[in-house]
Amino acid sequence: MIRLEKRKEPSQIWRIANPFLAVVLTMIAGGMMFAALGKDPVAAIRLIFFDPLFSEQFGSYSRPQLLIKTAPLILIAVGLAIGFKANIWNIGAEGQYIMGALFGAGVALAFYPIEGWYIFPLMILAGALGGFLWAMIPAILKTRFNTNEILVSLLLVYVAERILAAMALGLMRNPDQPGFPGSRDLRRYESAHNAELIANTGLHWGVVAALIAVIFAYIMMTRHMLGFHVQLAGQAPRAARFGGVSPARLVIICLGLAGALAGLAGMFEVSGPGGQVRIEFATGYGFTAIIVAFLGRLNPIGIVLAGFLLGLTYIGGELSQMMLQLPSASIQVFQGMLLFFLLALDFQTNYRIRLTQGARA
Amino acid sequence: MILGSINPAVLLAALMVAATPILLAAIGELVVEKSGVLNLGVEGMMIMGACLGFIIAVNSGSPFLGFVGAALAGMVLAALFALLTQVLMTNHVATGLALTLFGLGLTALLGQQYVGITPPRTPRLDLGPLSQIPFFGRAFFRHDIVVYLTIALVGAVWWFLKYSRAGMILRAVGENHDAAHALGYHVKRVRLMAILFGGACAGLGGAYLSLIRVAGWTEGMTVGAGWIALALVVFASWRPWRAMAGAYLFGGVVVLQLNLQAAGVRIPVEYLSMSPYLITILVLVLMSSGKARASLNAPGSLNKQFHASG
C-alpha cells in the first residue's frame, strides 16, 4: 500500500531539484503535444529552448532579446513573490504593468517635444506610481471591505486592457498620424527613450532596475524585519497577529510594492522595446511572472534563473510563430505545464511516499 | 432618442442568453466551493469547453455532441486539478492559475484552424403557443433548450444541496472536513466528484459561448467570464437561486452596455465594455463588507488542505 507521510521539514534537496525536473518534464510533455499536432517535436522544442541563444540564423537577433524579455519578468516576479510568501495573492500584475506604462508614457507625451534630463526620471516615478495606484485598488478594498484580492486584482486586468485600448485610440493617439491607432514612438523622442546602455546587448534601464530590485528584495527578505514579518504572516498568521504584525499594513505593502515594480516594468517596456502605447502592448508578462515567481521558489535569486528560462520561452514562442505558424498564445501551454509539473513534483518536498505492508494499516 | 430604440422584450431575451454561460460556470463552481474546494481554473475549463465543443460540433455537425464533448473537456481539466490539489496536495491558487494558463494556451493551439467558421445551429425549443404571447413570448419563450436546462440545473442543485442526503454530506465535507472524515465520509472522493461536476458545468458554459451566444471561435474568447463566474459565487453567498439572480443581473449589464454601443452613445466602446468588470468588483465589495457579509456564509473548510494523517 502506498501512503503519504508529511515530512517534519520540507526537503531542501527536492526544493532545489524540482524546478529543473519540471523543466525537463515540460520539454518531454510539450514534445509529445507537438507530435500529436503533427509538428516535429524535436524541432519545436529546439526552436523554443535552444535556438534563441545558439542558432546561427536568429542568434544575433534573439540574444539581445533575452535581457529585454527577462527584465520585466524578474521585476514583476520579485514583487509578486513577496506577496505570495505572505499569502497575499496579487494575480493582476498584468493590469499594474499596463497602468505603469500608461502613466510613464503619459508623462513623456505631456512633455513632448521638450528635451530635458529630468523627463526620464519623472517617467520612472510616474510608472511606479501608476502600478502602485492600480494595485492599491485591491489592497484598499481588501483591508477596508475584506474583498477578495485575487478576484479584484484579476478583474482589474480586463479594465486596464480597455483603458489601454481607449488611450491608444483616443487621448494618447499620435496627432501627426491620425489614421493609425497608437501613440507617438517614444524611441524617437530622445529624452523619453529608454535606450540600450550598451549597443546590441538588450541592456536597458529596466535590466538595471530588475537587478536593483533583486538585491533589494534579497536583503529585505533575509535581513530586514519586514521580510521576517512577511514570512511569519504567511506561515503562521495567528502568531504574526499576536506578534504585532498588522495584516492590513502587510497587504498594503505587499500589493503596493508588487504594483510599483510591475508599473516600472511597464514603463521601461513602453519607453524602450515596446516604443509606443498600442492596443497589443501587453503580452502577458504579468501572468508569466507568476510562474517565474513559483519556479524561482519565491526566492529573489531563484527568480533570476527562472526569469531567464521563461524569457527564453518568450523568444522561442516568437520564433515558433514565425517558423512553425503556431499561435503566440501556444507558449502559454508550456508555461501552464511547467507550473503543473512543478506543483505536482513539490509534493515530494512536503510529503514522503511510504510503501507499507497492508497489515500495518 | 437613443434609448427609445431599444426594445425591452429583445433586451430581456438577450439578457437570458448573455447570462447563461456565466450561470452554468457559476453553478458548477458553487457546488465545488460548497465541498470546500476553491477552483480558480474556471476560466481555463470554460475556454476548453468553448474550443473543444466548437471543434466537435463543427466536425460532427451536431451541437448536442459539441456540448457533450465540452462537458468532457471541462471534466478532464477538472480531473487534473483534482489530481493535483487532492492527491498531490498542491496550492489551490497556483493550480487554478496553471489550469487557466494551460487552457488558454492549448485552445489557442487547437482552435487555430477554426477561426471564422460558423458552428451548426442549435435549434430553438418550440414552445408552441407560449412563444406567441405578446412581449413575454419574445422575451422568455423563444430560446434554445440550454437556457431552460440551465435554469432546471439551478433548481436541481438547490434541491440537491438542501434536501438530498448526498448534498448534505457534500456540505458537511465543505463545512468541516475533519468532522466529516471522523464520521466516516470520504472527503477526497466527495470533493473529486464536486470538482468534476464543476468542470463539466464550466465546459458547458464555454460551449454555450462558442456555439450559441457568439457562434464562432476566437482565441481567448471567454475574456474573463470564468473569473466573473467565480465572483458570482461570492455574490450569491453560495446560494443557487441568488447565483441565478446575479447572473441575470450581470447579463442585463452586458446587454445594456452592448445596446448602448450599438445605439452609438457618445462614450467610447472601450469604456462601456469595462462596465461588466467594474460592476462585478463593485458587487464583490458590497457583498464582502458590512452587514451583508457574504463571507459569513462561506463554507467553513473552503480552500483548506485536507490530509488524513495516520
Image (spheres, coloured by chain):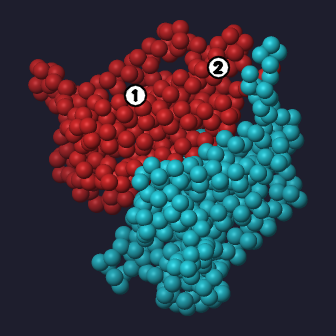
Chain colours: A cyan, B red
Which amino acid lies under the numbered mark 2 shown in the image of this protein? Answer: Val
Q: Position of residue B174 (x, y in %)?
A: 62, 22
Q: Is residue A35 visible?
A: yes
Q: Residue under mark 1: which chain is it in?
A: B
Quick one: label 1, few (<14), some, or many (20+) residues within 10 Å?
many
Would residue A224 appear left or right of B82 to someone viewing this image?
Answer: right
Residue at image location 23% in from the left, 30% down from the top: B144
| Crowding at mark 2 (Cα within 10 Å: few <14, some 14-19, many 20+) | many
Q: Amino acid at mark 1?
A: Met
User: Helix or strand or loop: what does disc 2 sit on?
Assistant: helix
Residue that badge 2 annotates: B187
Which residue lies under the disc numbered 1? B244
Q: Please tell me which residue lies in front, B233 or A61.
A: A61
One can see residue B206 in this view: no
Q: Quadrant of residue A9?
A: top right
Which residue is drawn at the image coordinates 57% and 72% (left, top)? A52
> Compared to B136, does A235 lie above or below?
below
Q: Is residue A1 above or below residue B206?
A: above
Q: Which mark is residue A220?
A: none
- Of the pair A142 and B298, the residue shown nearer to us: B298
Q: Which residue is pictured at 23% across the width and 53% down the height?
A: B262
Spatial separation of the CA atoms under disc 1 and disc 2: 28 Å
**Residue A132 image point, x, y percent:** 63, 61
Q: Quadrant of the N terminus of chain A?
A: top right
Circle 1 sits in a helix, a strand or a loop, which is it? helix
Q: Residue at x 59, y 51 (%)?
A: A28
Between circles 1 and 2, the one closer to the viewer is 2
Is residue B10 shown left or right of residue A95? left
